[in-house]
Structure formats: C-alpha cells, structure tokens
Image: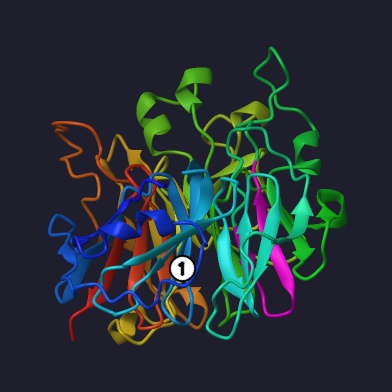
Amino acid sequence: MHKLFRPACMTAAVAGISSLLAFTGDISALKPKADTPKLATSIKVPQGFITTIVAEDLVGARHMVVSKSGDLYVKLSKLKDGKGVYRLRDANKDGVPEEVTSFGDYKGTGITIKDGYLYATSNSAIYRYKLNEKEEIINPDQPETIVTGMVDTGRDNSKSIALDDKGNIYVNIGSSNDACREAGTGKGMMPCTLLDTVGGIWRFKADVKNQTQKDGVRFATGLKNTVGLDWNRKTSSLFVLHHGRGQFHDFYPQYYTPKHSALLPSEAMYELHEGDDAGWPYIYYDHIQKKKMLAPEYGGDGKKTGGKNAINPVVGFPAHLGPNGMLFYTGNMFPARYKDGAFVAFHGQNSELKQGYFVAFVPFKNGKPSGQWEVFADNFAGIDLAKPSGPVQHRPCGLAQGPDGSLYVSDDMNGTIYRIAYNK
C-alpha cells in the first residue's frame, strides 16, 4: 500500500483512498465529506488575495501543470512510493483534492500539457502521455519516449520544458560547471567546449519518438542553467530564467569583495530567439551597473565590460535567489494589472539583502517588462531571514495557473502545494 501524502484538511471519510494512489481504477464515484481548505496565513500576499494549502508531504514537488478540468499534475524530483508524477483531483470542487493517483517511475522537473498530451521529463529524457477530451491520461503505464540521452551530470541537470504553437518542445540542458575553467588553473577555456552539449536551450519535435540530443537543434546558448522557462504567446517567443554562476570572491579576491560575491552576478530573465547567445561563461550580467561584464576567467576584473554580440536580459535580479519557475499570467481572476505579466518563483536567498524564498511579479506591456519587479507572495521561509530562528520551512519552485485563473505554487523542500486566489 502506498503511503498517502496529506491533502490539506483531509477528512476521515477519504483517508481510505491511500491504496488507490496508483492508477488502479476510477474513484470518481467517491463522495467524501466536503471540507474547507486550510488557510496559509503565514504567506504574505497583496490585499484581496488569499492563500490556501492544497496538499502537503509531496517532497520534491517541482514544476506543475493544471488540466482544463482542474486536475493538478505535479512532477517530483524525488520518487514517492516509486512514482515521479502525482495527479491531484478535486472532484467535488471544495478546494481539497480527495482523488490522488501517481505514475511514472522516474524523477525530474519538467511537466506541461499541449495539444492532447501531457509531457514530463526525467533528468535525461522527455516522455509524453495521451490525454482524453477531459485531459485525463489514457494509459499511464505506456508513455511515448520523445527524447533520450540528454546530458545528465547529476548537478544542475533539471530538464525544464516549454512548448510553442508549432509543434516544438524546448528543453534546458544546464551545465554543472560554473565557469568552464581549465583544470588546475583560474583561466577559462577558450573556446568553452562545454557549450557543444550543455549550457543552453535545445529544441526538438514534440511529436517525433526516440530522438536523441544529437537530433535536436541548439536553439540558444550561453545559459549556464535555466530551470524556469515559459512560452509567451503574446510575443510568440521563449522566455527563460538564468541562474548566474558564483564564488567571485573565493577565486578572485583581488577583484571582488565578499559583498560583490553576495550581490553578483545577476540572476536574469531573457527573451530568446533561435541563434541567441546570452554569453555564459565569457560574461555575466551586473544588474547594479546594468552592464554585461567580462568574467574573471576571461580577463575580467569587475570593471571591464564584454559580450558585444551577447543578448541583453530583459530583467536582472540579485544573485543567488535561484529563479526556478516562471509563468505568464493569462487568467481573468486577478486584477487587470497582472494580465500577461510574469510570475517568478525564487528558490534561494540573497544573504546580503536578507531576502529570498518568494514569488515575484514582473509587469509586462506590449510583450516587454513595463516596470520594476515586485515581491508578490512572501514568507515561504517561515522565518526572519535577517535573524533566523530555525531552518527554512518552504522553498517556492514551480508555478501553474488553474482554469479559474488561480495561481499554484509548489514547495520542493517539504512538499507543500499552495493555491493563491483573488477574493473579488
């Protein structure tokens, strides 16, 4: 029997479904006692918004997607009872999922729904599952294998995905090497041969089986690791969140102070088109100076600019915040100012700013950021980061939009799934 994680406020009337976690049959006939979702009163959101807890104990919950019927599919980076994808169904629409099923014997990050299929990734492959008209999986035990053999070094290896409207799937293939240094030296490799197989976005056909990495197109390069990405249908372009490298002061104290290392290099949002180069490892972005800077491995000293042919980010964030999820909001529940803007889930913290573990919002207008980014939902850490009194409790990772326009946030530390709604 599977050990059931705890949907928020689950009642005794539904506790007996733990034996039905695997796809063993339709349990929609169950009519559990209606319940009230648990309020997440510790999460700070703007006036008019309310946060509830959908589920708990889904440790390793990464990216998510919601079907048109409201089923929430969650991809796990750690197997739970041998499964890596969990489906949560709130059949009676009381805000508490009482139907839970699981499938897929692989761990990973990426998951999305497009054109009648659910796509999910391991750390080296992409699979897809046929859906019926209600976007329910028809045969969870027999997925189609779309891509295999993508580089997996065991670190910075999440295969986050997004699909366009022309039958293409885009996947992050990150680098576990921060700076592409020559072994035993502080000098960078020139050229950096890592870029042949990692450090960018690859594009594959979404409906062709058994592709390998060599069958894909390196769509964009110069991106160390981009866990968060989303296809913007307003601009018909891919947006990604780049994780900056680290350890400036550790390796180059003659150029960088500990404070420099705490604030730089920027985490950054890029809009990508085929052939774009964001410049890693040769350069980094400095959001304070708003300049592309030459990396110290390649002759930089914190003052020299570089990357003449590298694209500029559309937004620069402070270092080490770990942007892991991005979602362009297309719903109608939230106030109009949020329409078409980008939500960003930050998975880490900045020790200098004493800030982290929050969901931000970037306003957009005409396909471009139209103002300063702002903190939208905060205090997932559950502690004062300036004067911590204990361990961090939750780390935002994935974002998903419900058919009603609500926003779901996953926590990959303790496995809590939150739902943020606007109380009109």
Lateral position of residue 300 relative to residue 373, left or right:
right
Q: Residue at x 61, y 34 (%)?
A: 295
Q: Residue at x 57, y 67 (%)?
A: 112
Q: Quadrant of residue 235?
A: bottom right
Q: Is residue 143 above or below residue 226?
A: below
Is residue 308 visible in this depiction of the protein?
no
Q: Quadrant of residue 319?
A: top left
Across and down, in percent, residue 279 comes to: 67, 47
Q: Main secondary structure of the magenta part?
A: strand
Q: Residue at x 23, y 55 (%)?
A: 378
Is residue 51 visible in this depiction of the protein?
yes
Please say which color scheme the image uses: rainbow
Lateral position of residue 340 relative to residue 49, left or right:
right
Answer whether residue 168 is magenta in the image: yes
Q: Is residue 341 above or below residue 108?
A: below
Q: Residue at x 38, y 38 (%)?
A: 263
User: Which span is picked out in magenta?
Assistant: 161-174
Pointer 1 residue: 327
Q: Quadrant of residue 277?
A: bottom right
Nearer-the-camera pick, 159 or 44: 159
What crowding class fits label 1: few (fewer than 14 Cα within 10 Å), some (14-19), or many (20 or more)?
many
Nearer-the-camera pick, 339 or 310: 339
Q: Secondary structure at mark 1?
A: strand
Across and down, in percent, residue 28 comes to: 40, 76
Please, which residue is most extreme toward the top here?
Answer: 184
Lateral position of residue 234 relative to residue 259, left or right:
right
Nearer-the-camera pick, 92 or 208: 92
The three-letter amino acid code for the residue at tag 1 is Leu
